[in-house]
Image (spheres, helix red, strand yellow):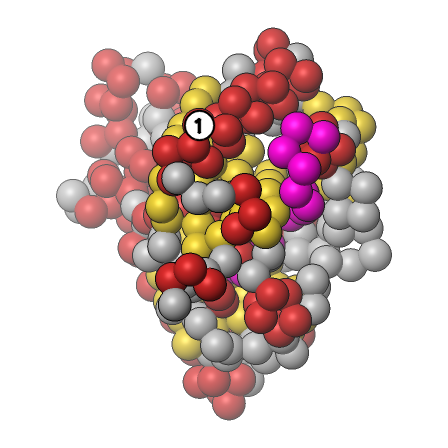
Amino acid sequence: MTQDKQYAVGIDLGGTKILAAIVDQDGDIHSQGKIATQPQDGDQAVIRRIGDLVQDVWEQSGIGTDRICGIGIATAGIIDTVRQKVIYASNLNWNDVRIGDRMNERFGVPVELINDANAAAVAERTFGNARGTDDLIYVTVSTGVGAGIICGGRLITGVGDSAGEFGHISIHPEGPFCACGNRGCLENYVSGLALAKKAQALLKAGAESSLSAVGGGERDAITARDIGEAAENGDKLSIELLTQAGYFLGIGLTNLIHLFNPQVLVFGGGVIKNGRLLVEAAEQVIRERCISRMAKQASIQISTMEDTAGVLGAAGMFFQAERKKLAI
Ligand SMILES: [Zn+2]
């Protein structure tokens, strides 16, 4: 039976590191590798390095060329999934980069791009705890906030591959201006960056907290992870910050549940990993505010995929059964 297995290459292209893996149709990773992105070298150099990395993991796996269905690339930013190019990615400093063509020229297999939050949704649905459900939303809270939405078995991408910008729904009409043009965006209340900034501002204003000792008293060094750890150790300010962020996240999630009536809500991202209180506060808001039947139908889960969601989702797009089910 194993001879009939399908394999694909999954790539998770981030601003600091790039992961590549050979994945089979059951979600097992056969070989993997990681390199630093070093975007300052320019897009062509980065693409070359990605190619070398793919070649390495491919050779390591010992799987024949004819058994690899394709190469999937999960990345942040604005992408064009028809022309397989990155239109704009601030973390890579890329503008109009045709990565799909370049990878296809080198390896001769189909190449597909996917937004990183969408890739995580595909991974959860194909290989994760949400396997088999047709209605799933993956929500990531890390440096930013995003979502991958699978509704009625279809990955919702929108006409320009930009659907799921959960971080930019407004939860406060008069809230601070956001770089996207909107005001009061969820991301400005909930993201890792927002949490760190808020903590830094409160400490500057004289608030007492164990966070003041982080990084030898260097306020700029405080991260969302520090806040999560301090909260677990009973730091009042950190508990308050996470609870408040969870409150806003819960309002956003209530809107999402009311729009899509999901069966599973999967949380992922670095802030979630270290922010138990944030999730608890969000769940509390959902219980209080959501139409109760819809709240009960939405099972809330924490992703167990850690860093592999991107590569698994990128590869997962290629498995025929999944493609048909997902309509991607
Ligand atoms: Zn915004």
Nearest the viewer among 227 and 95 is 95
Q: Is residue 285 left or right of residue 231?
A: right
Where does the image place residue 104, in percent across and percent down from the top left? 70, 35
Where does the image place residue 236, in percent across and percent down from the top left? 25, 44
Total labels drawn: 1
Tell me which amino acid carries mark 1.
Asp
In the rendered image, which quarter is residue 291 located in?
A: bottom right
* Residue 82 in sight here: yes
* Residue 99 in sight here: no
In the rendered image, which quarter is residue 219 located in?
A: top left
Q: Is residue 191 magenta?
A: no
Where 132 falls versus 292 (above or below)? above
Q: Which residues are magenta?
A: 105-122
Q: Quadrant of the C terminus?
A: bottom right
Where 224 falls versus 187 (above or below)? above
Nearest the viewer among 210 and 1 is 1
Where does the image place residue 300, in percent across and percent down from the top left? 40, 70
Q: Is residue 195 left or right of residue 87?
A: left
Q: Residues within 10 Å of mark 1 (few under 14, many from 20)?
A: some
Where does the image place residue 282, in percent across and percent down from the top left? 42, 63
**Picture residue at 55% right of the left edge, 26% below the top:** 50
**Picture residue at 65% right of the left edge, 78% below the top:** 152
What residue is disc 1 on? 56
Q: Is residue 243 left or right of residue 186?
A: left
In the rendered image, which quarter is residue 206 located in?
A: top left
